[in-house]
Amino acid sequence: MTQTPLLPSEEYIEQAFFFQSMREKIEENAPLQEILQSVREEVLATTKLPMAIDFLKAELRHLGLFHSAMQRLSHYFAPFQTFLIAAAEDERGRFDFRIALEILKLEAEFRAAEASPAAMFVYQFEVLCRHRLKYDPGLEAMAGDPIFDENWRNFLQALRRRIGMIDLADLIYVRSEYYVEQQSLRRKATMPDEPPIFGAREGRIALANRKKDPLLLFSALQRQLKYPSVPKPKKHVEADDLVHNLAQRLIAVEQRLKLLEEDQKGGFDLSKFYAHPEGKNKPPGHGLAD
């Protein structure tokens, strides 16, 4: 994988604006081609983003997709950014495109603020966990991120092999400065062969969250170290309500069609839609003639 270079902070600031504007305009049901053209006029012309948007527009016009263009712009978009858009464009998945844009907007802001590699790892890995994305291609994309050096890439490749077999909190703890401190206090303790990549505080928090749900570990890191929160998946309550309402409407339409059919056959009888008094078989109105 070609290593993506780190971009100046102004590029990430404009990327954050781009992803946010895209999401807002999609909510307004604007056509994607118009959205791209509108946002292109708004972003700073001194950055490389306008040229990237032009390329995205051309790819969208020919293939109807974004991620293939982002893949070809690997010198500008980080592999994990491309991975998220590809997951959102996968028709077989359930990863919402708007959520992907929200995640990318926060991640770009995080990059502009010169986030630490440890914080970026936690953010990206939590995205995989919360949104149930594929770990193997996700971790591979993370390993190609320019924020991670060789030690981090080795850690991510090892994590790909061990995912599901070893607790994430254990992996963070043994690669933390806190673990090195604890080992140095013990007699005849073996020092780790690999250098620590997490700080002492991350190590203590990881140790306290061993054998727990990884989401609790992420939550603790966010509380204690101000790590950014990952946008959560939208609940499907609205979708369920929509399905229920559509079903009710279909039943009503079906009943109306039956009424029309009976009317055309001359067998239309409104009396069967009246409520009959208890103990009587005659519909209301018959007593008036008695």
Image: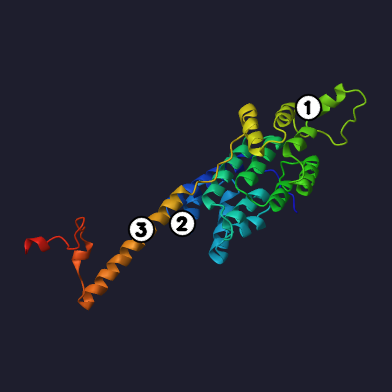
| Rendering coords of residue 17 (x, y %) | 53, 43
Between marks 1 and 2 in the image, the one whose residue lies nearer the viewer: 1
Badge 2 amino acid: Glu
Of tags 1 and 3, which is closer to the observer?
3
Q: Is residue 177 visible?
A: yes
- Mark 1 vs 2: CB contact within 8 A: no
Tag 3 residue: 248
Q: Secondary structure at mark 2?
A: helix
**Few, some or many residues within 10 Å of mark 3 (<14, 14–19, 20+):** few
Q: Amino acid at mark 3?
A: Gln
- In the drawing, what numbered circle is on residue 237? none
Q: Residues within 10 Å of mark 2 (few under 14, many from 20)?
A: few
Task: Name the quarter where the N terminus is drawn.
Answer: bottom right
First in residue order: circle 1 vs circle 3: 1
Q: State the residue position of label 1.
A: 178
Q: Secondary structure at mark 3?
A: helix
| x and y percentages locating residue 115 in the rendered image | 66, 35
Q: Which of the two discs, 1 and 2, labels the residue nearer the N terminus?
A: 2
Q: Residue at x 58, y 62 (%)?
A: 59
Examine the rendered structure and indicate whether residue 6 appears above or below residue 188.
Answer: below
For residue 6, which quarter of the picture? top right
The image quadrant that residue 156 belongs to is top right
Q: Is residue 114 visible?
A: no
| Residue that numbered label 2 is attached to | 34
The answer to whether the residue labelled 2 contacts the one labelled 3, judged by CB atoms less than 8 Å apart, is: no
C-alpha distance separating marks 1 and 2: 52 Å
Query: How many angstroms separate mark 1 from mark 3 (CA)?
Result: 60 Å
Percent of width and height locating residue 259: 25, 69
